[in-house]
Image (spheres, grey):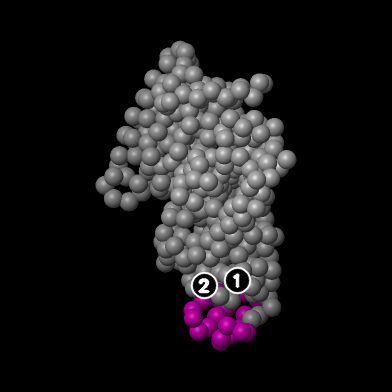
Amino acid sequence: MVDLIPRQEIMTRKEFTLLMGTRNGPCASIYMPTPWVGAETQQNQIRFKNLLRIAAEKLSSKGVRTPEAEEMLSPAQELLRNSPFWKKQNTGSAAFVSRGFFRFYRLPLDFQEMVHVSDRFLLKPILPLFGSSGKFYVLAVSQKKVRFLQGARNCIVELDIQNVPKSLAEIVRFDVSDRQIRTQPSVKGSTTFHGHGVWSEDIKEQILRYFKQIDRGLQEYLKEEKAPVVFAGVDYLFPIYREANSYPLLQEKPITGNPEGLRAEELGRTAWPIVQPYYMKIQEDALDQYRQSAGTGLTSNRLEEILPAAYHGRVGVLFLAAGKNRWGRFDPATGSVSFHETAGAAETNGEDLLDVAAIYAYLNGGAVYELPPEIMPERSEVSALLRY
């Protein structure tokens, strides 16, 4: 049965691990920019259609017969007939197809058009969501609407999540302004309270229950996560949400004010300075550890050494240079590595070995960072801090 997800998917660690473990080859990875404002948005369906044609051609070159290739790509073709779906894009999209498997993600990353077919999915373009410029979430709560957004350094996308109340008004009826909180007659024992410091315990308890419902709904998505969450809402709601919250990476600094009129990009721009210190500290700690371990035998920048180490779980931290590829083949059984000079050779008998190293390191619990080439340890295309 085909695993069809024709809607917004949150790229969690669980989803990423699922993609890494899928080997119903050949596997087609399709990346594309999906502008969501302006005239270019109308080209998204056409762009995806053209990329599916390229995917079919590459599957054929891998020996997949035309009827089977059409069956594999049929869930993706269904999306082309869903015009409303294409009106809800943001920044970048990625589709992954193999036998009996299909995933489509709308992600806060700016991808280049690409179709890659090999024995596994190409996942390195998604790595920024799990590194030093990694993802974060924004929970924006107003009286009329609850929004949950996934962002990275320069991009953010609003997510369609289930099992979370859609508005505060569903639970509590009260008007919020900068100077007063006025309960409505529908609330038992309602009274008018002026100022932010005076609360009806009944109202506070209702809001707390409401926030606990949000927290329970988000647990399904965040239980495998290590990404920070930023709360956005009027300042006197944040302490109540903090009381309800069970997620350990809720940031202490919220985005204050009513977020109702703020666009996703505005929330993203405001949230990134809040979460950036979290990611910068992780990155700096990892780089410091690499520098301190230099000369001890626990560091390497030789891919032919790093790949077997990653496969056997010896890589604790892997650094990859952004925008770099190294094509070839890795044989896990023997630990041998062979290199190709071009992507074309890899398409027929190879893969991006930097991507392979990242997959094995991540699957075995290692941290993976994609860094600008100028700050890479020893200015190499790949470096690893080994566990032993």
Q: Crowding near pointer 1: few (<14 within 10 Å), some, many (20+)? A: some
Closer to us: 152 or 68: 152
Q: Can residue 175 be seen from the camera position used here? A: no
Few, some or many residues within 10 Å of mark 2 (<14, 14–19, 20+)? some
Q: Nearer the viewer, residue 113 or 290?
A: 290
Query: Which residue sits at x=56%, y=75%?
Result: 235
Instruction: Report helix, strand or loop for mark 1.
Output: helix
Q: Residue at x 52, y 69 (%)?
A: 255
Q: Is residue 37 left or right of residue 388?
A: left
Identity of the residue drawn at 42% across and 16% down: 61
Q: Can residue 113 be spotted in the picture?
A: yes
Above or below, 177 against 254 in this view is below
Instruction: Give the main secondary structure, helix, strand or loop, of the magenta stretch.
Output: loop
Residue 23, position as x, y percentages in the image: 59, 25
Q: Which residues are magenta?
A: 174-198
Q: Examine the rendered structure and indicate whether residue 377 appears above or below residue 211.
A: above
Q: Position of residue 90 (x, y in %)?
A: 41, 48
Name the residue furthest right.
388
Residue at image coords 53%, 31%: 353
Disc 1 target residue: 238
Mark closer to the chain start, 2 or 1: 1
Q: CA distance from mark 2 to mark 1?
A: 9 Å
Confirm or deny contact between disc 2 and disc 1 (CB under 8 A). yes
Q: Please name the residue that numbered disc 2 is placed on.
A: 256
